[in-house]
Amino acid sequence: MSKTGIKHVGIRFEGETCQISVWAPIAKIVICRLCDNNLEIPLRPLKYGYWYAESTLITPGDRYKISVDGNELPDPASLSQPEGVHGPSEAIDLRFNWTDQSYKPPKNSEFVIYEIHVGTFTSSRDFDGVIKKIPHLKDLGITAIEIMPVAQFPGGRNWGYDGVFPFAVQHSYGGASEFQRLVNAFHAVNIAVILDVVYNHIGPEGNYFSNYGPYFTNKYHTPWGDALNYDDRFCHGQRDLVLNNVRMWFEDFHIDALRLDAVHAIKDFGAVHILQEIRKETDQIIINSGKNRFLFIECDLNDRRFLDPLTKNGYDMDAQWLDEFHHALRVSVGEPKKGYYEEFNGLNDLAKAYEKAYVFDGNYSSHREKFFGTDSFGLEGNRFIVFCQNHDQIGNRMLGDRAVKIYSSEIARLMAFAVFMSPYLPLLFMGEEWGTEKPFPYFISHSDPELVQLVREGRKKEFEDFITNSDVPDPQSESIFRETILDWDELNSEPYRQRLLYYKSLIALRKTNPLLKDVQRDELKVKCIEDKKVLLLQVKKKEKSIVVIMNFSDHVQHVNLPEDFKWRMIFDTHETQAELIVGTDKPVITSYPLSPWSGYVYSSQ
């Protein structure tokens, strides 16, 4: 809990009593007005700019607005916005009949993550659609889903990063109770739920925060405008908001982990960083609940401080998305060195990413024109999350095209193999497992024509380094959006079924092989045979060993295996039948021709 002692903001029910809490430090009069009967409930001022009231006149389902010095607005801490971002807020009760008391989240090393955008995952575009795909996800073998942001956004379609009500679950997805039902259903089959949250900016349309108080500061600027206020005058209001939000997701929604978007864009130079406070808040929730909770971050600073413990004045986040692994992998398979790929040198950098996580760990970055990054020595592999596709790395492409649209099936298989053979936590993006070609460009449904045009112009500028003959997809276009919705009927035909079998086998290998499922970075030896474009990884544990070989060239290569063991092949990315891939008896070998764009796993006898 923050220093102000505020337990929660907005409207909450305790029995039949409704507690109303609003932060408006400059206001003279604050009133909660019920829309249906115009009943007004005056709030009294408390310390630190808070206003408070208790009432039995509000019941779940009532619509209300907050009047701040006569200006009626939606509640910034609203739990529900059934009429959209400009409409009244709805008072709802978050109490839910949970049945997950015996559920325990996976250990750090056991996460196999599947990223989902609720609005495009199924044709119903809601939480119920996701719930109905639980058998598919369980059979696939993943241990956690990661839900892209669900905070209420303008209109009915959005990536989720334009959310303007951080406590309100998107109404078109099903709202709070349906999201709770989703979490409960996944916990019933022992799949964890990670939620993507955005604490670095608030979306532009429906953003009423500044009408209440200085939630923003002009001390710093971000790609979205003025920064959220984490260290300027009155910053306790924004800090309280975030800590309350973290507590709500963990306690009221039983979320297992939060993925914090772009924490490098959080501007906080105070003595105690907001991430440190989030860590402490989360640790207290773990103690109170007896269940683990995790904090994952997106960060492009290559700064180990985000992962170092609080005792070293670090931020102690549990894991970080490792974009540099992705960039090095893409260049290794032939991605043109443009934009943020320009300074990656393919296989050598990929080898470094396997071994040291950060490619830029204090060396010179030509893209940034400075020496960049810190080392990651001593940080375990499960502190990093890797991928060959995710929402950003697909959506950051001008056409939002997926790997199978760009590369051959052999290369796409090799890329996935490279991810699952790493000592890091693997993540895949929805539909990747069956090789759908459905694009995933950025999309919106704003109502302000001027704002829509600004977004269009911004997208065109973003792709200046990736000029092609194609037009930049219109993010406001509903037809562009509808092209992103997954077609589950694809699973009834080839080559999709064989691709799915491959991913199942790959995930099963990762989860069941004792040397792969919990690889420690100091157990992994990496060798780059640059002239052959071959990468060799070896893991040793006691008397056992495995060797992973990847051929990133377009022709056959021959590589001798280490002589300290006799070897048997247990995985080949070119095999097409799942039952032939894992655990098949193969003759003992010392050298084996490596097919173009292929990967193999050899186990010691």
Image (cartoon, helix red, strand yellow):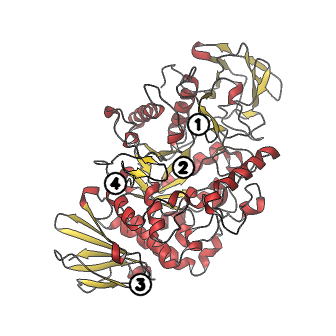
Residue type at tag 3: His
Which residue is label 2 attached to? 183
In this rendering, does residue 566 appear at all? yes
How much space separates mark 1 and mark 4, taking CA atoms? 38 Å
How much space separates mark 3 and mark 4, taking CA atoms? 32 Å
Above or below 563: residue 359: above
Q: Residue 94: which quarter of the image?
A: top right
On the picture, is 182 further left or further right than 81?
left
Q: Secondary structure at mark 1?
A: loop
On the picture, is 213 further left or further right than 598?
right
**In the image, residue 27 lies at what x, y percent?**
70, 16
Check contact, mark 3 vs mark 4: CB within 8 A: no
Q: State which tag comes first along the sequence, 3 or 2.
A: 2
Residue 381 — which label? 4
Residue 555 — which label? 3
Residue type at tag 4: Gly
| Total numbered circles | 4
**Nearest-to-viewer mark from 3 and 1:** 3
Q: Residue at x 80, y 19 (%)?
A: 70
Residue type at tag 2: Val
Q: Secondary structure at mark 2?
A: helix
Residue type at tag 1: Arg
Q: State which tag comes first along the sequence, 3 or 1.
A: 1
Which residue is label 1 attached to? 95
Q: Residue 46: which quarter of the image?
A: top right
Q: State which tag comes first along the sequence, 1 or 4.
A: 1
How much space separates mark 3 and mark 1, taking CA atoms? 60 Å
